């Protein structure tokens, strides 16, 4: 019997916000923007190709929330930039708690 496919069980919120992603081992960093966020992760656009499972620090430009993140995937986009999926740990609800976001922006994937 085949194992069931694992599906994301949480909502993602389409939210463009500027974040600083940095490599704690080298000090390299980039200021970029998110595509969407959830309490367990974020998708961001980046200029660099990051290795899967690489640990990064993720901090929104506005506010003091800082999270550790693990690169879950990093794929080339049509414009030559990269789309990176980050798993945040520990999970945080702070990024998804904006009461100003319309419900229609929430998607499951």
Image (cartoon, rainbow, N blue to C red):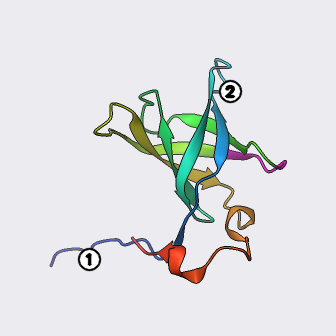
Query: Earlier along the polypeptide chain: callout 1 or callout 2?
Result: 1
Chief SS of the magenta region: loop
The residue depicted at 73 percent of the width and 71 percent of the height is 97
Residue 45: mark in rendering: none
Can you name the residue that lies furthest to the right here? Answer: 64
The residue identified by callout 2 is 24
The residue identified by callout 1 is 4
- Dot 2 crowding, Cα within 10 Å, few <14, some 14–19, many 20+: few
Q: Quadrant of residue 56?
A: top right
Q: Quadrant of residue 75?
A: top left
Can you name the residue that lies furthest to the bottom here? Answer: 103
Q: Quadrant of residue 83?
A: top left
Which stretch appears magenta? 63-68
Can you name the residue that lies furthest to the top here? Answer: 26
Q: Nearer the viewer, residue 12 or 5?
A: 12
Q: Relative to 51, is 76 on the left or the right?
A: left
Give the quarter of the figure containing the C terminus.
Answer: bottom left
Vertical placement of 98 versus 16: above or below?
Answer: below
Q: Does the magenta stretch include residue 41?
A: no
- Dot 1 crowding, Cα within 10 Å, few <14, some 14–19, many 20+: few
Percent across and percent down for residue 46 are 49, 35
């Amino acid at each position: 019997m085949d194992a069931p496919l694992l599906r994301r069980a949480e909502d993602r919120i389409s939210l463009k916000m500027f974040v600083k992603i940095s490599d704690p081992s080298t000090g390299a960093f980039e200021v970029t923007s998110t595509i969407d966020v959830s309490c367990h992760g974020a998708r961001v656009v980046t200029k660099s190709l990051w290795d899967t499972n690489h640990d990064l620090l993720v901090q929104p430009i506005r506010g003091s929330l800082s999270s550790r993140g693990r690169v879950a995937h990093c794929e080339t986009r049509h414009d030559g930039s990269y789309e990176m999926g980050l798993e945040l740990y520990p999970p945080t609800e702070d990024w998804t708690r904006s009461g100003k976001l319309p419900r229609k922006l929430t998607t499951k994937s």
